[in-house]
Image (cartoon, rainbow, N blue to C red):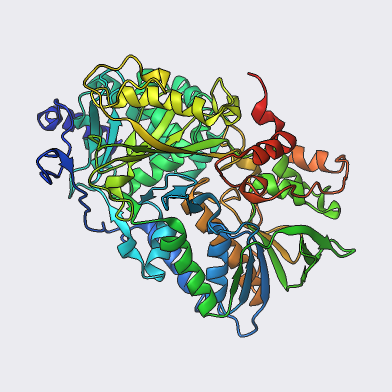
Amino acid sequence: MRFVVFLLNLATWASAFAPHARLSVPSRTATSSSSNNRLVMKDYPKPNVENTDNYRLYNELSRSFQTTLKSDKPQKVAIIGGGLSGLACAKYLVDAGHVPVVYEAREMLGGKVSAWQDKDGDWIETGLHIFFGAYPNMMNLFDELDIHDRLQWKVHKMIFAMQELPGEFTSFDFIPGIPAPFNFGLAILMNQKMLTLTEKLQTAPPLLPMLVQGQDFIDAQDELSVLDFMRKYGMPERINEEVFISMAKALDFIDPDKLSMTVVLTAMNRFLNEDNGLQMAFLDGNQPDRLCKPMVDHIEARGGQVFTKSPIKEIVTNDDGTVKHLLLRSGEKVVADTYVSAMPVDIVKRMIPEKWQSMPYFRQVDELEGIPVINLHLWFDRKLKAVDHLCFSRSPLLSVYADMSVTCKEYYDPNASMIELVFAPCSPLAGGNVNWISKSDEEIIDATMGEMARLFPAEIAADPKWPATLQQGPQGQARLRKFAVVKTPRSVYAAIPGRNKYRPSQTTPIDNFVMAGDWTSQKFLGSMEGAVLGGKLAAEVIARKAKGMAPLPAKEIQASIVENASKHKVTKPAGVKGEGAIAFGGGAVLAKDNEKLLREVDPNQFATV
C-alpha cells in the first residue's frame, strides 16, 4: 500500500519534472563541418549492483564452489553444449576442483550469444544483448572474471519511440538517489506522453500482490496471458499499447496476448526491488572475444577443456539407464563421471535415449519449445540521429533496437550508423500472423525499412529497392548499404501461458546426468542471466553430490505428465541432422542448404497462416 500512497503524493508535483518536448539526444558535438549533429558515445559509471539481496545470495553461491563445495576428489564432467549455460557450468565446476570438458557442436562458442565476422570483417551477432543491473549472476560472473570494465553502462532510463508521433521519443527517467520501488513509480509519473495520471494510478493496485507476496503470486499467474491478467484486475487497456507490447517483445519476442504474465511480473519484480535493476549496459565488443573467451581462459587455466566442432551423435546408456558414454560423430567415445546437457530444449528432445523416454521428468520437455526470432543488422551510408541507448520501437514488427555504431566501442563509427534490431513476433506461436522465418531476407528487410522510415521519417530515403520506403519525402537521404538477417528458428523457450510448471529441475532421475540451460527451472527466465544461473545450479548439483551432501529437492512434476508418461511410445532418438547453427539450435544467415534442412526438421516454420 505504501507504493500507491507514494504515487498519489507524487502525482501533484511530478508533472513539473515531466519532459513535454522531443527527447533530446545527449552528448552531441561537432566533429566536422558537415556533421555538427553527430552523436558521441557517453558511458556512465558502473552502478552499485552489489547492494541487493539477490546479488549477495548468488555471490555466496559463487564463493561456496571454492569453499564448502570444493572437492579433493576431482570428477570428470562431460558437458554437451558451449553456450553460456555450458560454459558457466564448467566455470563453477573448475572452481570446485573438478575437471569439466565442454563439447560444442559448432565451430564457435556462445550458443544464443554467438557471433561471427562476415567477408568485410563486420561482426554478425545472433541477438541484440543487453545487460541489466538486475542480473545478479551475470554481474557476479563479470566480477569473478575481472571484466567489469567491458560493460558500457548507459544513463538510467527507458526510451520509447512514439508510435503516433513518428521520429519522436519519450522516456522513463530514473532520478539518482531515489530508492526502488519509488524511483520506478516516479519515472512513470514524470512521463506525460504515454499514460494519463488516472491510467497510471489504475495500473498500480494489481501489481501490489507481486511486491507483497513475491514469487508465489508471480508463479500463480502463469496460466494467464498479459492481456488476461490486465482484464482480470481491471488495468486500463491502453497500458498494453503503451508499455506491455514493448515489454513482452523485449522479454520473450512474444505479443502480450500470447505471453505468460509470470514473465512480465518476474521482470518487474526484479526491477522494482532493486535501485539500479533497470539500468542497462552494452558489451564493449563482440561476445566471443569479450565474454566467452574469458570464461574459456578461466576454465582451461584450472584444468578444464573446451572443444568446438565436436558434435554429439548419441547419449549411450547402461542397462540401468545411467549414461555409459557419449558417442561423438567422429566415432570417439567420451567417458566421464558425470554428464551435463546444456543443449537447447528442442535439441534435447531429439537426443533423449530410449530408456529415458517413459520417465515423467523427460516427458515434460514435450510441453516446451523454442520461439522463432530474427536479429537484423542494417548498415547505412550515413549517420542517423539515434540515441546512445537501447530503444523500444513500439512497432508491430520490431522489438528493440540500438545504433551499435554509437553504443558499442568496437563497432563505433562516427560517419555511418549500424542499427541492430530484433524482428518480432515471427510466428503465430508468438502472436504474429506471418511465419517470417520462411520469408526471404529481402521481404524481411523491406518490411523493416518501412518501420525504419517511421522511426526516422526525416532521414530514411525513398529507395526503389525497398518499396516500403517509397512514401518518404525528399528530405530523407540515408540509404541501406548492407544488411544481415540472422534467423534463429528455435530461440529461448516460448513462455506462453501454462508452460512454466513444465520447466525441469537441474536434478534428473538419472544418477550421473544433470540438466542445464536457460529453459530449466530457475527464476530468471530465458535470458543470458537465466543461462548463467541454469549452468551454475547444474554445477551445484554435481558439486554437492561429490561432497556427499544431501541432494537438493527436485521440482514437482505435474500429475498429468506422470499419468501419461508410461503410455509414451518409445522410439529411437531422432538425433540431430545436418551441420551448422540451424541444425544445433542456433542462429544463422539462412543459406539454401540450411533452409532445406529446416524444412525437413521443422516444417511448422513454413506453414501457411
Name the residue nearer the viewer: 10 or 522.
Answer: 522
Residue at point 32%, 58% (across, down): 151
Q: Quarter holding the N terminus?
A: top left
Left or right: 385 in relation to 130: left
Left or right: 229 in relation to 190: right
Left or right: 86 in relation to 10: right
Outermost residue toward the bottom in this view = 72
Q: What x and y, as percent, mark residue 252? A: 50, 37
Q: What x and y, as percent, mark residue 184? A: 27, 39
Residue at point 64%, 73% (across, down): 549
Residue at point 45%, 42% (across, down): 266
Q: Quarter holding the C terminus?
A: top right
Q: What x and y, as percent, mark residue 318? A: 87, 65
Q: How many marks?
A: 0
Rendered image quadrant of residue 391: top left
Vertical placement of 371 versus 235: above or below?
below
Outermost residue toward the right in this view = 319
Q: What x and y, as percent, mark residue 167? A: 25, 25
Name the residue nearer the viewer: 170 or 602.
Answer: 602
Name the residue nearer the viewer: 10 or 498.
Answer: 498
Vertical placement of 570 versus 341: above or below?
above
Q: Is residue 320 visible?
A: yes
Rendered image quadrant of residue 198: top left
Residue at point 46%, 73% (across, down): 63
Name the residue nearer the viewer: 581 or 464.
Answer: 464
